Amino acid sequence: MDGMGLERERKGRAMAAPWWDSEYKDRSSLEYRVYVGNLPYSVDEQTLMDYFADYGAISAEIAWDSVMGRSRGFGFVNFEDSESVNAAIQGMNGQDIGGRNVTVAQANTRPRRWRA
């Protein structure tokens, strides 16, 4: 196939569904997540969940550095609805967790292909 034919084929696939994502699904669903930064390296997912339990946290995840084998100092907390997200941001931003004042903000929506 010549260069133009290959380019047309790529464009055709990208129009129907991204070629990199074999499990393409609707990406418009809302995520109710907050980013939590400046976490101490000792905080694990259960501890993070405990801090956000009063706001209706349903799950938490810590970003891990596979090379260093420790937390990268930030994580994400998931909620059922936007009211819980807003309450968590208002209530927890700047609060002390393990001796550090954390940053809590609305998390950016991530593409499905990066989700676990």
Image (cartoon, rainbow, N blue to C red):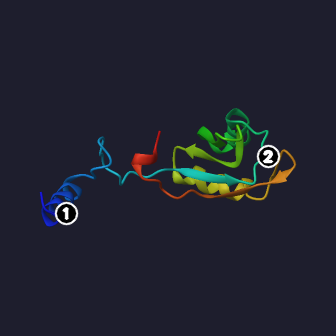
> Relative to residue 39, is residue 103 depicted above or below?
below
Q: Which residue is mark 2?
A: 40
Which quarter of the figure has residue 7?
bottom left
Q: Which residue is mark 1?
A: 7
In the image, 107: left or right of 74? left
Q: Callout 1, which amino acid?
A: Glu
x, y (%) of residue 50? 72, 36
**Which residue is found at the position 55% from the left and 50% from the top?**
33
Of 12 and 57, which appears nearest the observer?
12
**Which residue is found at the position 19% from the left and 54% from the top?**
13
Q: Callout 2, which amino acid?
A: Pro
**Which residue is found at the position 29% from the left and 42% from the top?**
22
Mark 1 lies on a secondary structure that is helix
Mark nearest the camera among 2 and 1 is: 1
Which quarter of the figure has residue 104?
bottom right
Q: Quadrant of the N terminus?
A: bottom left
Number of numbered discs on residues: 2
In the image, 53: left or right of 100? left
Cα separation, mark 2 vs mark 1, equals 47 Å
